[in-house]
Amino acid sequence: MIEFYLDPDSGVAPYLQIVRQVRQAIRLGMLRKGDQLPTVKEVVASLAINPNTVLKAYKELEHAGLAAGRQGIGTFVTAGSPEPVVEPRAHGALRGELERWIAKARRAGFDDESLDALFRDCLRSARAKEEGIA
Amino acid sequence: MNAVLEAHGLGKRYGRRWALADCDLTIPASRVVGLVGPNGAGKSTLLQLSVGLLTPSSGEVAVLGGTPAAKLGKIGFVAQDAPVYAGMTVADHLRIAAWANDGFDLEGARARVEQLDLPARQRAGRLSGGQRAQLALTLALAKKPKFLLLDEPVASLDPLARREFLQLLMAAVVEDDISVILSSHLIADLERACDYLVVLAGSHVQVAGPIDELVATHHRLTGPRQRGGQPLPSGQELVTESHTDVQSTLVVRHDTPILDPAWTVSVVSLEDLVLAYIARDKDTRGKREAQDPPSTPSARNLKVAS
Amino acid sequence: MIRVSYWQFRLPLYIALAGLVVVAAAAGETGPSLAHLYDTTVGACKPADGNCRAALRLFNADDVLLRAIVQTLSLGLPAIIGMFWGAPLVARELETGTFRLAWTQSRSRLTWFAGKLAVVGLSALAVQGLLSLAFTWWWSPVGRANPTQFSPAQFGTFGVAPLGYVLFALALGIAVGTVFRRTLPAMAVTLVGFIGTRLAVIFWVRPHFAAAVRSVVSLNQSSSIGVGFSDNGQMALRFFPPDLPNAWLLSSTVTNAAGQQPAGSVLAQQCPSLIQHQAENQPFNSCVATLSKTFHDTLLYQPASRYWPFQWAELGSFAALAAVLVVFTAWRLRRQ
């Protein structure tokens, strides 16, 4: 049975940390289709976290098609295979766009470091939008 | 709506000083509430008013829909530093608690005590701080309460004791569906367990609400230095701000999405959110004290001019 | 809450019972020999033989220390109970913060208080009552030999009055502890308050439980008469009032019909021969006979028959004070 941990300083919401740990476990083959995830009570008692956090995580996993709850018994893994890989054609198109964008930025005077800072800032904002803003 | 705690205009005064003032709170059931604020903010006072250890100087408080005295059998309380009778053994504490409460789960309490490795014959005065806290929590839980109030339960505990205490607490919460309010001056202690937050500072409630909602409606805006005094769009409320010569940082509460491209929007951690409200209270009080001397509490002015 | 209070109080109670057993054993050991001593001295003397004074002296000289211990214990026990059982009752809980545990169980504060009061109060009454019983039994030969049971020094030591004292001391300790919130200062204040109240009652209240009996007696009946000289060389006579066994003499004043006390000049006038022949009986007796024509002794006293009514009145007064203090404490606790 998988054992969860929580990193309070990671900046990632606790429920997402649980989701990611399940995803990782599935990807690495530690969790297979049909395996049972720890009950809400077990997770709460070992991590001392709010039960809603666990419920939210499990709901998210259900939403993503990775797990399913069975009334009165528990939550079980439904997808054993790793997640679908990014489409290879999308890969090439994105790469081309990125190269054109870098050229544009160079013309505007951006060096490697400022390019890096701008990219990381945008990624952070995008993530914030994904994760929270109404 | 069934609220476990309802306060209207609740206040407690000692001489001229109001330890708690103008407290209006409605806390819904089935939550784990974190009551956070600096020392002396009124957290202990609020909790003690809610269990009937203090009588209000103004306003009223209701728990589980009734007065604290009426609902004493259904609420559990652990005071700061978990007071126990130093001369009595752990087993004695369980015994007299069973006599002093109807519906006390003595067997369950004994099982828990054994599970926690608390020596039953040991005098409570010889227990460590963590063990005392666990004993006090066991006594409170064995009452089978619907609402549990804990006053700084982990403040003086080492990290391991703190974790063990919270584990004991959360296991019981999930098993018996208990509503909890626990106070601390460090949000970090409570963050993992709580889903509802009440911030107390300067004897007043600063903000209260489900943590999900608070985190979703508060963000940090950073951008180039603003001249200041510019009002924010409606639906947005400034909590706190700071400026350097080139940069401005605001913490803002908003009901509508923030669309202004001039700002970089980022997430505010719960700790920073709490600190922002504490800072705002300090600012407001400082400005008010500069204008007139402290007397009775007045209504808060929420829009702060910079 | 009685069970709870008993369980928390059981150690002091056991100690007190153990002490009681020790005292009872000691009393049982020494009591019979004291009674025997009485029987062989004062009990056996015949006034006609004139040896009763000597017998009394012999009896009274025996084991003075033990008698002093008995009196001290009997007088002191209420104060000790008030300080050690009363003062900490509420104060200890307030001091250590355990009231935050005790008052958030399912019972109200007043229920909690009533339980404690019942257990400690009944224990105090039992301990004091049994002790008083033992001491009163032990003391009875002394009381027969020296009938002074109504005197202020002895009145509060035996009988039922100590039950009132212990209730009062306990209630006082509890009330003071509730107000002061600290055990040690409360103990000190309880002791002072208890002693003060006892003295106040002895001097200002007890004499008025019933109107004193006024009796005028001839000087010839004085139990003894003494001669002395005042500072300015004047001769003075002192008249000791007649013996009123087991009664409480409040005052004895020698006056003439007009209410004046005999001045030194009067004495010199009426008893001229006394100045030169002080030591001789004849001038002495004739002087007294002369003076008794104009002077008499006015006694104010409570007769011996009133001893038990006074005991009950004393018990009732202190019990009433205790009740007031208990009500006050209950009010204070609610108000917290």
Image (cartoon, rainbow, N blue to C red):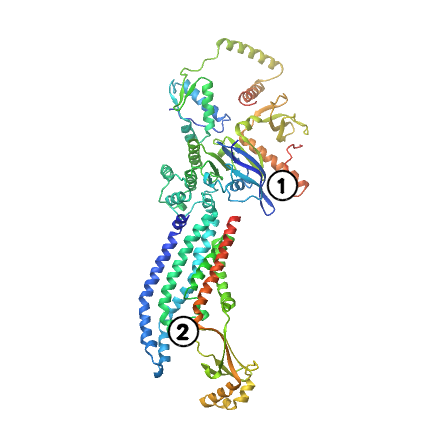
Compared across the picture, whether B286 is left or right of B174 comes to: right
Q: Give the spatial CA distance, label 2 vs label 1.
A: 72 Å
Report x, y in % for residue C138. 35, 67
Reading the image, the residue beneath label 2 is C147
Report x, y in % for residue B246. 64, 27
Which amino acid type is shown beneath numbered disc 1?
Pro
Q: In this view, does C73 lie above or below B147?
A: below
For the residue labelled by badge 2, is the local secondary structure a helix, a strand or a loop? loop
Q: Do labels 2 and 1 share a chain?
A: no
Q: Is residue B282 above or below residue A56?
A: below
In the image, which disc is placed on residue B297?
Answer: 1
For the residue labelled by badge 1, is the local secondary structure a helix, a strand or a loop? loop
- In the image, B92 versus B37, the foreground residue is B92
| Quarter occupied by the C terminus of chain B | top right
- From this viewpoint, is residue B41 visible? no
- In the image, A10 versus B127, the foreground residue is B127
